[in-house]
Image (cartoon, rainbow, N blue to C red):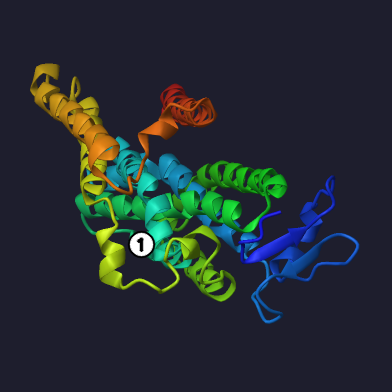
Amino acid sequence: MRKDSAYVWSLPRHHVITWTQLAPLWFGTFSQQNTILSLSLNSSAPANPLPTLLIGAFIAQVDSSIVLASSKEIASSFHALSDASWLITSYVLAQCATQALYGKLSDIFGRKVVLVFAYSVFTLGGIGNAYWKVLLGQAISGVGGAGMIALVAVIIADILPVREIATWRSYVNVIATLGRSCGGPIGGWLVDTIGWRWCFLGQCPYAALAVALVLWKLPGSTGKDSAEGAGGEQSMRSKASRVDLWGVITLPSMLAALFVSLDRGGKLYAWYYTLPIALLALVLAAAFYYVEKVVAEEPILPMELLAKRDVAIPYAIVAFQTGAQFIASTIVTRICGF
């Protein structure tokens, strides 16, 4: 059991927390027979914050699938049906470009600060009176959604003993799957009834509630972030100096160039017009590898991780799963004619 955590959990080895216990878990009212929660700080420490994090995971997954279901209607209202895919691409691109940054940034500035930032940014993204503004709002939401998803896993690893991490990760996976499943029907219903703008506006109250719950329940430090100086011992300038700035610049730029070249090539322009953008993506990828391997003292994505089988295989599974989701939705859309 980890002694450096803000929370120390004592659970029977084969104990399983059922869904009927999630409401008591929310407020930290555990029965002695089921779960014993020992707070290593003091008796006035906040209750279990983990169910609170599930709200963010749910909202972030709902956003991606709800826009997937309503993208053609949104694009058609701006006479930009040919660019409907960019509603999804802008969100996913921003999410992919920034998700790797949150782990190291939360090590430096603290989990709570960075998580509140992610929720706040997600809430800011929304609708606009022009199509490019809607795309920009989707990109902003993607930046926030990346943190809402990534930091859940980080915080779970911080405050739980190793033997309980898989249990809570299963809860996160169930909630994420539920969010992806509910987004499509909800988006279709909103488009047919009160309008597609409520696909974005309807998420704001829940995101604001999630921010309030995080501020209330999540402790200021959760293990590793306090150990690395996020607890206030360092000045803001010294913390900012630890950020891998070149990595922050090269990784999103590389992904943006790659996605733009793949999306534009063969559709709006001939492939040889987008070849320079693809070559730029390769140059930026090489620059990112060099920065992370040689230059950065605290890299945002250590290259050694990618060589480990335990890391590479799960990422490959997620990549194929996500790709299959978008391919299946495209096929169904074309078959059904909507």
Residue 218 percent across, percent down from the top left: 56, 69
For disc 1, the neighbor class at 10 Å (few under 14, some 14 to 19, many from 20) is some
Residue 209 percent across, percent down from the top left: 53, 70
Which residue sits at x=69%, y=66%?
26
Between 14 and 271, which is closer to the camera in this rendering? Answer: 14
Which residue sits at x=60%, y=53%?
156
Q: Which corner quadrant of the image does residue 31 belong to?
A: bottom right
Between 9 and 319, which is closer to the camera in this rendering? Answer: 9
Q: Is residue 101 visible?
A: yes
Residue 188 percent across, percent down from the top left: 49, 45
Quarter of the figure with the C terminus: top left
Q: Is residue 97 left or right of residue 258?
A: right
Quarter of the figure with the N terminus: bottom right
Q: How many marks?
A: 1
Between 178 and 242, which is closer to the camera in this rendering? Answer: 242
Q: Residue furthest right?
A: 33
Q: Which corner quadrant of the image does residue 292 belong to?
A: top left
Q: Is residue 338 visible?
A: no
Dot 1: what SS? helix
Q: Is residue 228 left or right of residue 172?
A: left
Hey, what amino acid is under mark 1?
Val
Report which residue position mark 1 lands on: 121
Which residue sits at x=68%, y=52%?
161
Which residue sits at x=20%, y=23%?
267
Above or below, comparing residue 328 to residue 142 in the picture: above
Above or below, comparing residue 269 to residue 125 in the picture: above
Q: Residue furthest bottom?
A: 44
Residue 318 percent across, percent down from the top left: 50, 31
